[in-house]
Image (spheres, coloured by chain):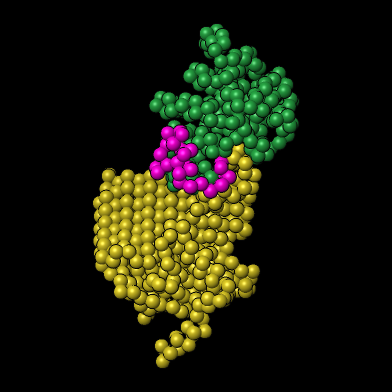
Chain colours: A yellow, B green
Amino acid sequence: MESNKDSMIDKAEARDSSNDVDVRLLDTILASKSLKDDKGLETGAHSLRKNGLSVELKSTPNVRIEKKEDHPGIDVFVRDDTPLEFVHVPVIITKGGFDDVVYNDFHIGRNAHAIIVAGCGIHNDDACNAQHDGIHRFFLDEGADVQYVENHYGEGEGSGERILNPETDVHLGKGAVLRMEMVQIKGVDSTVRTTNAELDDNATLLVTEKIMTSQKQSAKTIFNVKLNGKDSKCQVTSRSYAIDDSSQKFISNIEGNAKCFAHVECDAIIRDHGKVTSEPAITANDVDANMIHEAQIGKIAGEQLVKLMTLGLSEKEAEKEIINGFLA
Amino acid sequence: MIELKDIAITKGGRQILHDINLRIPDNEFVAITGPNGSGKSTLAKIMMGIEKPDSGMILMDGKDITDLTIPQRAAQGIAFAFQAPVSFKGITVRRLMELASKKELSKSEVCNYLSKVGLCANNYLSREVNSSLSGGELKRIEIASVLARHASVSIFDEPEAGIDLWSFKNLIDVFGELRAECNGSIVVISHQERILNIADRVVLLEDGTIKDVIKQGEKYSLFTDQIRCCKC
C-alpha cells in the first residue's frame, strides 16, 4: 500500500525534462569542471529527490542504492574493488513551504573508486521558506578513493528564504582518500555547513570549499577533524567572496592525535559591507603532529586590478576575472 | 612611436621627474638606467598610465594619450611588465596568457610564449599564478605575458630583479630575440650592463631628469664610470 502511494506521489513529482526550472537547477548543480567524463544522470547510478520525495532511483552492478526504511534518504553501497563509478544524488526544490531533511549514507568498499556528485538547487517563488538539510555520512573502507562534489544553488523571486544546512560525517579507514569539493554558487540566503571527520592510519581528507554570498545572506562553515591515525593527512582550503551586506564565518577545529599533517587555508575577498570571520583552531596532541593554518581576508588587491588593466581589461572586467578565478 | 614632452611629477613634496623629453621611434630598443630613486620606474609607469604626470604630454604615433586610462593605453598597443609581478589565486598561467593575447590559445601557442622565457608549458599551463611559484618563475611568466601582447611599445621595469643567474642568461637571450623579431619599440628599465649593451640607446636618469643619452657603442666607458659615480 505504502509502495503504491509512493509510486503515485513519485509520478506527480517526477523530474520533468521539459520543465525549464528542473533542467536549469539540475544543470547548475551537476555542472563541474573537474568531471569532464561524466555522463550525467542518464546512464549511471543515481538518486534524484524533488520537493521532499525520492523520484528516481537507479542502481548498477557495482553501486546499490536503497531507500532507508526508518528515515527519508538512501543508503549507497559501492562494492569492493570497483574501478571507477559515478554516483549522482542531486536534490531539487521548486516551491516554498518545505523543510526537507534527508539522511544519505555512503558505504564505500575496500579499494573502491567512486565519484559522487551531490548538491541541492532551490527555486523559490513563494513567500514561505524552502529549506533542505542533507545529513550525509561517509564510511570509506581501507584503500577506498572517493571524490565528492557538492554544488548548492538558489534562485527565485519569492520573499521566502532559500536555506541549506548540510551536515557531513566522514569516517576514513586505513589508507582511504576522500576529496570533497563543495561550492555554494549563489542565491542561498542562509547556510550552516558542518563537516565532522575521523581519519585512520594513512587516510587523507582533502576539502575545497568555495562560497559566494551577497545581499543579506549569511554562511557559516564548521570543520571538526580528528587525525587519529598515524600518517593521516588533512588539507582544508576555503575560499569565500562576501559582497553587499552578506557575512561569512569559517571555523576549523583540527586535532592531531598522532603523527600527522594538517594544513588549513582560509582566503576571503570582501567588497561593499561584506564581512568574513576566520576562527582557526589547530590542536597538536602528539609531538609529531605537524599543523598549519593560514588565513587572509581583504578586498581585491589594487595591483591585481592594475596588472589585468595593463592587459586591456577594464576595471570591472578585471574584478570579474579575479573573482571568477578565485572561485573557479 | 612614443614621445614624452616636458613630463614632470612630484610625490610627497619631492620632485620625482622634471623636464623629461624623450622620443622612442618604432623598432628601437631603449634602456633607461640610473641610480636608485632617479625616477626610472615612475617614468615607465607614466608611459603605461599607471601614474599621472603633473604636467607634460605623452604622444603615441602623434596622438595625445596623456589622459587615456591604463586599458585605453593597452588598446593603443602599450604593454608593461612589472618589477614585482602580481600573483593571483585561481588564475592559471594559461588564462593569463589568453587574457594577454585577447584570444583562446592552443597548448602549442602557450608553449611558444613560455619556452621563450625558459619555462616548459607542460609544467605550468594549469598552475595558478600564485605564491607557490618562485620569484624567478613569476618574473618569467610576467615577461611572457608581455610577449603575448605583441605590443607596439613593450615596457619592462627591471626585468632582471629577482631573477637568478641562470635565468638571467636566458633573459638576455629573450631580449636579444625580442629585438630581432619585434616590430615595435622596447623600453627596458635596467641596471644590468648586459642589457644596456644590447640597447640601441641608453638613457641615463639622475635626480629625475635625463642626464645623458648614449647610442650603442658611444662613450661606453665614460657612461659606466658615470653610473658607478652616481651609486657612490
**Quadrant location of residue B50?**
top right
Asked whether A188 or A43 is in front, the reply is A43
Residue B104 part of the magenta-drawn span = yes
Q: Quadrant of residue B135?
A: top left
Please say whether residue B140 is one of the residues in the magenta stretch: no
Q: Give the percent coordinates (x, y) of residue B9.
A: 69, 24
- Choose between A185 and A174: the one closer to the eye: A185
Residue at figure coordinates x 54%, y 51% from the top left: A324
* Camera sees residue A307: no
Residue visible at 59% across and 14% down in the picture? B214
The kind of secondary structure the magenta stretch mainly shows is helix
User: Where does the image place residue B173, in percent across and percent down from the top left?
Assistant: 46, 26
Look at the picture and state if B186 lies above or below A202: above
Name the residue rendered at 54%, 27% in the picture: B179
Q: How many marks?
A: 0
Q: Quadrant of the N terminus of chain B?
A: top right
Residue A11 in the image: x percent, y percent?
A: 49, 84
Q: Nearer the viewer, residue A64 or A214?
A: A64
Magenta highlight range: B99-123
Left or right side of A122 for A193: left
User: On screen, B70 above or below A111?
Assistant: above
Vertical arrangement, residue B46 with respect to residue A76, above or below: above
Task: Confirm whether residue A11 shows in the render.
Answer: yes
The residue shown at (46%, 70%) is: A90
Residue B47 in percent (x, y) is at: 65, 29
